[in-house]
Amino acid sequence: MACEVKLSKRAEKFLRRASKDLIKRVNEKLRELSVNPVCEERLKGILRDCCKTRIGNYRIAYQPRPCTVIVVDIDHRDKFYDKLKRLLKR
């Protein structure tokens, strides 16, 4: 049974601007997470409520919940962690 994947507005905005190849890879990873919503790698510090997964040089931050995966952000690894810290401090 596949779980629901919910995208934040930031994640939706990223996908609208991404290349078709990257969108395809992200969708494939999100399908995997919907089937098996476990934390691949837990983030540390103020980001400890989130997990991350890698897609080449891109990262997806998500929060696994019972039968739901909430995608917090998707971005290139250069900007990902600083952007996520600013987002979660609010």
Image: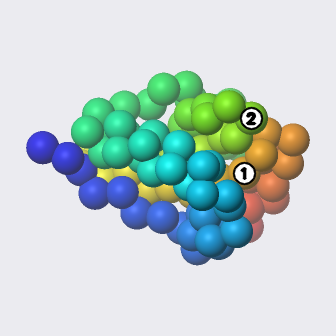
Can you tell which of label 2 and label 1 is closer to the viewer? 2
Give the crowd class for mark 1: few <14, some 14-19, many >=20 residues within 10 Å. Answer: many
Q: Nearer the viewer, residue 65 or 74?
A: 74
Q: Residue 42 shows which numbered tag?
A: none
Q: Position of residue 14 (x, y in %)?
A: 67, 64
Dividing the picture into quadrants, the one containing residue 39 is top left
Q: Residue at image x 73%, y 61%?
A: 87
- Reading the image, the residue beneath label 2 is 57
> What is the CA distance from the residue labelled 2 to the residue labelled 1?
9 Å
**Total marks in image:** 2
Residue type (three-letter) at the residue carrying disc 2: Asn
Which mark sits nearer the N-terminus, 2 or 1?
2
Q: Amino acid at mark 1?
A: Asp
Q: Secondary structure at mark 1?
A: strand
Residue 75, label in figure: 1
Position of residue 85 in the picture relative to residue 71 (left or right): right
Toward the front, the furthest residue is: 20
